[in-house]
Image: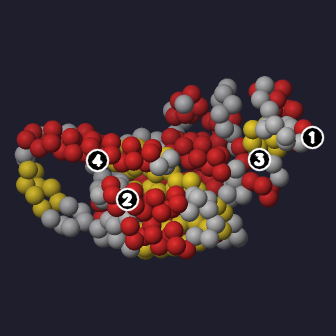
Amino acid sequence: MSTIETSRNRFIDPKVLVKIQNMELVARTVVEGFVSGLHRSPFLGFSVDFAEYRDYQPGDDLRRIDWNVYSRMDKLVIKLFEGETNTKSMILLDVSGSMNYGSATIKKIDYARILAACLSYFAYHQRDGVGLLTFDAAVRDYVPSARRSGQLPNILHTIDRVTPGKETEFRKPLRYLAEILRRRGLIVLISDLYDDPENIMAGLKQLKAKGNDVIVFHIMDDFELTFPFEEMAQFEDLETQRKLHIIPEYLRSQYLEILGEHMKKLSSEMAANRIDYTLMNTSKPLDQGLFNYLAARAKTV
């Protein structure tokens, strides 16, 4: 946590990032700033070298201990060879209609696109295989996880051209991925999680059953979390186009209660199934997402 606090103020506002047209430039700017912040942290935490080390365990070859790290950090770590560090990462990006919402900050889909691009860039430059699956009620795009030349530009191009689509449906896309994956790895879901918790968990449990580590980034707009509306207005469901006239002061407490129950059920279910859950407010920088991805990825090394 201290490492996150150390770097938080260094991050570029998401509203600024979304104005940059080049997705690779956005990803490189955020990731390199994040890595630089980790290097400057006085805490061990994780660093850009994390992919090349793991904690010493009894029975490990003493010749592989990095004594330079020990002298600086008083911590025994084993240096890994390149072939031992490769992790397969798969980014699942929700592109359903509800992701097109944005209040005073940026749209959820744009925040999610930037996060997906940053994680892909980060994984690729740590010598990991990385892939992408975008979905709404069905699979929209699928780029198999790989480390080959041209993989990152292909993923970033796919992310750059996504547009919000239909209603959300988690069971089919996640089941599809569980069926075609041949090697376990790290699965990263980026979504506003607007579906029944049972449907979401059914898909995630299938991926966990295949031996994958799973991390979920719950993307929410600040207005969705606080419901600050005061005047009577017409609200439209971005997935069904259903319109509803409401008086906010009569609906606010009920809405926040329902949302709280939804989020509580999801987070508790994920915790029970050893799935990492992180709430991401689109008005906040992306460092928490990168740090939590790094922590989850380190478990697979």
Q: Nearer the viewer, mark 3 or mark 4?
A: 4
Report whether 26 appears left or right of 104: right
Image position of 172 with respect to 69: above or below: below
Question: Dividing the picture into quarters, in which one does residue 75 lie?
Answer: top right
Mark 4 = which residue? Answer: 262
| SS under mark 3 | helix
Residue at (62%, 53%) from the top-left corner?
122
**Residue annotated with mark 1:** 63
| Front-most of residues 251 and 100 | 251
Q: How is the image coloured?
A: secondary structure
Other residues around mark 2 within 10 Å, as few (<14) / some (14–19) / many (≥20): some
Q: Pointer 4: residues within 10 angstroms few (<14), some, or many (20+)?
A: some
Give amino acid for label 4: His
Q: Which residue is mark 3?
A: 52
Instruction: Say which element carries label 2.
Output: helix
Which residue is found at the position 33% from the left and 42% from the top? 264
